[in-house]
Image (tube, helix red, strand yellow):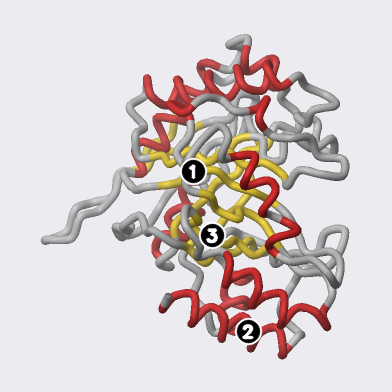
Amino acid sequence: MKRAFTAVVLVAVLGMASFVCVGVLMSHSSSAVSQQQSSVSGPVQQLKIRDHYLGVITPGNPGGSGLTSFDDATKVKPTLVAFFEPFGDPFNAVAAARIINRGAFPLLQINSRTVSPAAIAAGHYSKYLAQFAGSVRQLHRNIAISYGHEMNGPWYPWGYTHVKAATFVKAWQVIHRAFARAGAYNVTWVWTVNRSGGTSADPDPWWPGKQYVDWVGVDGHYINNSDSFKVVFAPTIRQIRKVTKDPVLIAETGIRRETEQPAQIKNLLNNARGPGMLGVVWFNLKARYSWRMQGNVAADHAYYDAAQAYLKS
């Protein structure tokens, strides 16, 4: 069996332009690195961390054609793009670089579908984490990372009906410490919970501690005609404020009913610029419902108008 290795891409420095050396590593269980992940061609621009964001999650390759379609429909250029990768995969440096070069801050949501938080907490993935963190460090650009989003809900294998909160917290801390040991200080850590209520528990037991978190993400969607920011997000934000004053990002949201989208989009963005708020990430995918904005001209126009007001406020 071939030994696992780390593929390091050296990008030449030409003239006064700074090029980036990006390392892409093997997964814990794989002995092959995809061609897409094996190189980053050309320079990766520098981005400043903003005070407020308008973000999106799109289908397909992160930062690719799905993002272009969203841009074209809404006429709004996102300043943050979130994407999902499973724990155990190598760091997708190509995706992060592509997002950065489109002028957006990358938010990597790492999921634990096949690797249990208990195994991570027990230290079984220390070598993988060291390699992954090293590759993130070698990006030399700021990136946000979240592990095990919506852990206070029961639907994911890392959720509260499957994993104890204390085990999840320990796994989070083990991951964070691995990045610190690797010197990967270019990471903004985002602790992402689901809105409380219904089948979701209050998020407090999953809080890893202030030294392990930079931002708080809250996921929630407008399902009913009567939904508003006050209904969907305000109760959870009040709970979060009991444990931290970290800035809050609406890390995943959408509006189910097309007829309500224009008014509810305005409500969403008007409230997302309040004190301690970082902004909104629109879930532009089809899941249980279709949250995509394209095809609803009224929603596209409403998003554009609300976005302009948001950016000027």
Q: Nearer the viewer, residue 224 or 138?
A: 224
> Residue 191, located in which quarter of the rendered image?
top right
| Mark drawn on residue 186 | none
Residue named by callout 1: 215
Q: Height in image: 133 above or below 241?
A: above
Question: How far apart are labels 2 and 3 at the CA level?
Answer: 16 Å
Q: Would you say 273 lies left or right of 69 here?
A: left
* Number of residues whose C-alpha sits closer than 10 Å to that of mark 3, classed few (under 14), some (14–19) or many (20 or more): many
- Three-letter amino acid code at the position of disc 1: Trp
Q: Nearer the viewer, residue 197 or 129?
A: 197
Question: Is 64 left or right of 199, judged from the image as shown?
Answer: left
Q: Secondary structure at mark 3?
A: strand
**Residue identified by numbered label 3:** 81
- Which amino acid type corresponds to the residue marked 3 in the rendered image? Val
Using the rendered view, name the quadrant where residue 46 is placed. bottom left
For discs 3 and 1, the disc positioned in front in the rendered view: 1
Question: Considering depth in this image, is 236 or 126 the residue closer to the camera?
Answer: 236
Q: Is residue 49 left or right of residue 89?
A: left
- Provide the secondary structure element on which disc 1 rests: strand
